[in-house]
Amino acid sequence: MTTTLKIALYSLAFLGLAGGVLWWIMDHRRGTAWAVSVIQDRFPDVPQISAADLQEWLNDGQRGPPMLIDARSDEEHEVSHLPGALHLNVETVTTEALQKLDPAKPYVVYCAAGYRACQLARQMHSAGIKDVRNLEGGIFAWANDGHEVQKGDQPVQQVHSYHRLFARLLKPERRQP
């Protein structure tokens, strides 16, 4: 066997193994935990709130609710969003739009898994809004935990996966057909 052929076979074996590991990691049980750890490592300055803690806060009649901000694309938001969420696409939001937000209110931002929401949280903080948290695991964790998502003002099951690779981060019943 030639050296070139050996290198090619080893490379294919490595790629196959790496693909298998990625496929194993990327599911709704392990994948969101992995995504949360990556987000916390990449954005240590952005406070996090779990789906359970956010739901408890929303249910607490003594405490005013936070303003929910959906940082995802228009297409993602149209498929489903958290009830009452304001849509501010992180890709197109302007500083002027952020300056119109009430800096005295608490905010919880979310996207699919957390990366874009943390980017928006940083932008909001730079615009003078101090109480901004990221929904840990994003709408994926929220939906996978059984919390309500809506299309318009109607409850729905499906969540936009952002990219078809990330669909595995959602429980099968939460994936788009």
Image (cartoon, helix red, strand yellow):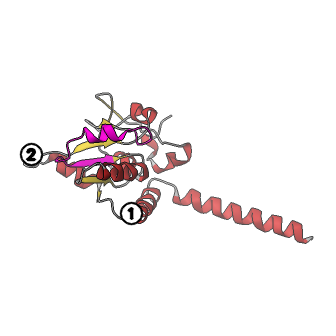
**Element at badge 2?**
loop
Instruction: Residue 23: name its quadrant.
Output: bottom right
Relative image position of residue 84 (x, y in whole percent): 25, 35
**Element at badge 1?**
helix
Relative image position of residue 157 (x, y in whole percent): 37, 36
Relative image position of residue 12 (x, y in whole percent): 76, 62
Q: Which amino acid does label 1 sit on?
A: Gln
Residue plotted at (38% across, 42% down) = 71
The residue that label 1 is drawn on is 40
Residue plotted at (32% across, 38% down) = 96
Instruction: Residue 99: name its quadrant.
Output: top left
Residue plotted at (29% across, 44% down) = 147
Magenta span has 95?
A: yes
Which residues are drawn in magenta? 89-109
The residue that label 2 is drawn on is 61
From the image, state whether disc 1 or disc 2 is nearer to you.
1
- The disc placed on residue 116 is none
Left or right of 39 in this view: 19: right
